[in-house]
Structures are given as structure tokens and as C-alpha cells.
Image: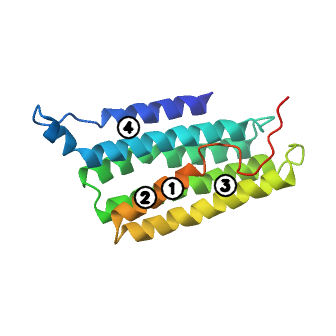
Amino acid sequence: MFSDGVFAVLITVLVLELRPPGQPTFVALLSLWPTWLSYAVSYIFIAIVWANHHYLMRYARETTPHLMWFNFAHLFSISLLPLSTAWMAVSELEPQPVAFYAAAFSLVNATYIGLIWELLDRRSSVKISPKVRRLMRVRSFTTLALFGVAAMIALKYPLAGLGLCICCLLGYLNPEPPMAETRRN
């Protein structure tokens, strides 16, 4: 699948931004903690987005122009992550780069909402309970708002903004919405 290739390339680009410390000491390595933190959060974010993308795409029965463009928009938003990660890392978690990073998370989430709308709401043939649809919407819109709040908070308190982004990711560790009944065949 094309999307899987994009995710793989983004993780590769992300790791290519990592540089070793200038000195051969653990102190020098530890001084790069903003870079390692930025990389780790972004890697986990891409992994979570990939898992949720796979979960959602299982509802695709056919490729339509709308679905392709929503998917391209989603992949584009994710492609901003290496840039925002690198900027946040080299700035050592300064407010504006962290706010931009949180805004990138917002954009990824907004385009995910577009995929949900295209795959689940516009198609009456998709068999998914109204409860699961509602839970997916609530989770998505809640985290979209929280990512926006994180971007604003980051302008004054960058670590708090980043922390809020990380907390939002926890809600997506399991692609199945919380409280949804999972049916096993």
C-alpha cells in the first residue's frame, strides 16, 4: 500500500536527523535530551498514526477520488512531522517550535477526521455501530481541541504543551475507540 511506504519514509527521514554528540561522553549524549525526546515522541506518534490509519482503512471497500484525496491530505499532514521535530529539537524545545509541533499534530488529527467522515459517515454500506461511530468522533474532536490547546499553551510553557500532546497520544494507542465492544470472529 502506498500509505505504508510514506510512513516508512517518514520514519527514515526522522532518524536521519539524529546526530551524535560532539564529544565521546555520556554527558554530551545526555545534553542532547531535547533531540532524543523530540525523536521519541515523533516516532511513537507516527507509529500510532500508522496503526490507526490501518484500523480505519479496513473499512474501505473501494478506492474513490474522495478517499484518495482525504488520504493524500492525511499523508501530507504527517509529512510535516520531520520538519517540526527537527525544528523543535534544534531549538531545544523553545516555545514557538513546540507550538508549531502541536499544530502539526492538530493538522494530522483534522485530516484523520476527514478520513473518518469519508470512510464511515458518507458510506452507508459500512457496517459499524452508531456507538463506535460516535466514540470515534468524540475521541477525534476532543483530541483535536486538546492539540490546539497544547499549541497555545506551548507558547508560554513549551514542556506543558508537549506533555499535553503526549497525553493525547495515549488515547490512540489502541485504534479501537474506548468503550467500544470488540467482536472477535
Which labelled disc corresponds to residue 167?
1
- What's the mark number on residue 163? 2
* 2 and 1 marks in contact (CB < 8 Å): yes
Residue at the farthest left position: 23
| Residue type at numbered disc 2 | Gly
Of mark 1 and mark 4, the one earlier in the sequence is 4
Q: Which residue position is annotated with label 3?
A: 113
Question: Residue 127's spot in the image, x, y percent?
Answer: 88, 43
Q: Residue at x 85, y 46 (%)?
A: 128
Residue 54 visible here: yes
Left or right: 45 as drawn, with respect to 92: right
Classed neighbour count for the residue bearing mark 4: other residues with Cα under 10 Å, few (<14), some (14–19), many (≥20): many
Q: Residues within 10 Å of mark 1 (few under 14, many from 20)?
A: some
Frontmost of labels 3 and 1 is 1
Q: Quadrant of residue 153?
A: bottom left
Helix, strand or loop at label 1? It is helix
